[in-house]
Image (cartoon, rainbow, N blue to C red):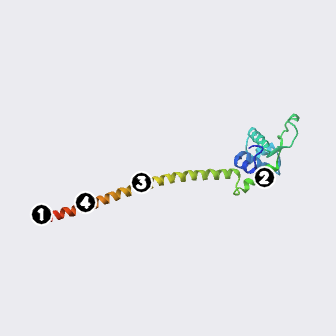
């Protein structure tokens, strides 16, 4: 996530934990203490701090309390989802009405299907080539059978002429 990214670009890069943090803030009215975010998301305090810092850097969340010099409040700082953060959640929901996590899962499954399809197409191509080889071999063998029938007929005629 980068400050200049558009919401749709952020949605593509948004992982599960930052998404859960944004949803937690949004679900609690848009402004919430860090301790409630950790309760809602089951994400540890230091990891929540890490993701909140990244979300603030991308402009999706902002801290609403005073300065760090005033000391950290007992329940942690208070965070507010920004308009850009709200847009990111809206885009995530509009994207096939899925969360970024679901969307990423769908993309992963689609990529697996594409990989499997490519593999099946390669296998199919090999089978087509084998069928072509066998068809040519069959035609060659049928030609030899025709030649043998002709030779057999000629031999039969020769035998009959000797009698």
Distance (Cα) linking label 3 and label 2 = 55 Å
Label 1 CA crowd tier, 10 Å (few <14, some 14–19, many 20+): few
Residue under numbered circle 4: 148
Label 4 CA crowd tier, 10 Å (few <14, some 14–19, many 20+): few
Residue under numbered circle 2: 87
The residue positioned farthest toward the top in the image shown: 69
Mark carried by residue 130: 3
Q: Nearer the viewer, mark 1 or mark 3?
A: 1
Distance (Cα) linking label 1 and label 3 = 47 Å
Instruction: Indicate which disc, 3 or 2, sits on the residue closer to the N terminus.
Output: 2
Instruction: Indicate which disc, 1 or 3, sits on the residue closer to the N terminus.
Output: 3
Examine the rendered structure and indicate whether residue 62 appears above or below residue 98.
above
Q: Position of residue 100 (x, y in %)?
A: 70, 51
Residue 149 vs residue 44, the one in the foreground: 149
Distance (Cα) linking label 4 and label 3 = 27 Å
In the picture provided, is 135 more to the left or to the right than 100? left
Examine the rendered structure and indicate whether residue 112 appears above or below residue 159.
above
Q: Residue at x 31, y 57 (%)?
A: 141
């Amino acid at each position: 996530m980068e400050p200049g990214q558009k919401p749709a670009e952020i949605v593509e890069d948004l992982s599960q934990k930052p998404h859960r943090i944004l949803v937690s803030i949004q679900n609690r009215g848009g402004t919430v203490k860090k301790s409630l975010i950790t309760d809602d998301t089951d994400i540890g305090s230091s990891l929540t701090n890490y993701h909140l810092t990244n979300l603030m850097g991308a402009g999706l969340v902002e801290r609403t309390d005073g300065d760090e010099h005033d000391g950290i409040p007992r329940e942690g700082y208070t965070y507010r989802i920004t308009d850009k953060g709200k847009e990111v959640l809206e885009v995530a929901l509009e994207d096939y009405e899925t969360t970024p996590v679901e969307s990423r899962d769908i993309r992963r499954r689609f990529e697996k299907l594409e990989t499997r399809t490519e593999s099946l197409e390669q296998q199919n191509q090999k089978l087509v080539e084998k069928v072509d080889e066998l068809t040519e071999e069959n035609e060659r063998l049928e030609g030899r059978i025709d030649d043998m029938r002709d030779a057999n007929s000629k031999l039969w005629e020769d035998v009959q002429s000797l009698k």
